[in-house]
Amino acid sequence: MSDTATYTPRLKTKYGEIIRGQMAEQFKYANEMMIPRLDKVVLNMGVGEAVADSKKIKSAAADLELIAGQKVVITKARKSIATFKLREEMPVGCKVTLRGDRMYEFVDRLITVALPRVRDFRGLNHKSFDGHGNFAMGLKEHIVFPEIEYDKVDTIWGMDIIVCTTASSDEQAKYLLTQFQFPFQIL
């Protein structure tokens, strides 16, 4: 038998050992499969400057790839808008979907490293849930992530982070994310 230990992300272990039990106790689920879990995390970076300079989209995609640790997809305009000098199929942003261990690792870095580095951070907004158990937030600067070297960044972009859960209500999703130590604003 080999002596290789498999690595499990810290938050995934915490979910399996602690959070699942707390959720079952709190909401009295009839079935173990009803207990909400994190489904996926979607990172999106809109790069409007890419219309004028095509190198910007490559730079943004490279930065998002460093943050996510996974290949990104470049998003393209669906239709032309003359006032923005935008033509159909022009690159306008990039996105990546994280699942499994990479998702848990990203959420861990977001909570413990990136959010504390945000200037004037007062907590996450309670109203950012969509009614179906998903949470969306935005960052004004992508440089809060430790993977990005501040000196090598030519432009600072904002990014959207959407945390999708299997929860059926916002109340359950908020409880789940609170157990993962998401820093929500104190009412």
Image (spheres, rainbow, N blue to C red):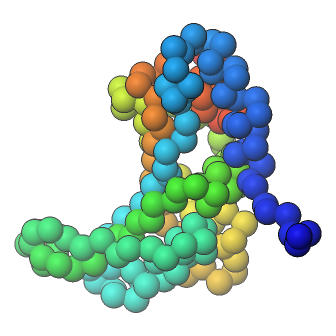
Percent across and percent down for residue 35 are: 55, 26
The picture places residue 130, in percent across and down from the top left corner, at 36, 32
The residue lying at 36 percent from left, 26 percent from top is 131
* Number of numbered labels in the structure image: 0
Quarter of the image where one finds residue 23: top right
Residue 119, given in percent of the width and then of the height, sits at 67, 49
Name the side, left or right, on which 74 lies relative to 135.
left
Position of the N terminus by quadrant: bottom right
In the depicted view, which residue is nearer to us: 49 or 149?
149
> Does residue 128 show up?
no
- View extreme (front): residue: 1
Q: Is residue 167 above or below residue 8?
A: above
Q: What residue sits 37% from the left and 65% below the top? A: 46
Residue 29 in which image quadrant: top right
Is 72 rendered above or below residue 138?
A: below
Instruction: Where is residue 3? Give x, y as percent.
Output: 91, 69
Q: Nearer the viewer, residue 13 or 86?
A: 13
The quadrant in which the C terminus is found is top right
Q: Residue at x 28, y 83 (%)?
A: 52
Question: In the rendered image of this protein, does residue 34 appear above or below residue 158?
Answer: above
- In the image, residue 61 above or below residue 167: below
Give me the residue at 12% from left, 76% from top.
Answer: 88
- For this view, does 175 lie left or right of residue 113? left
Residue 98 can be seen, yes or no? yes
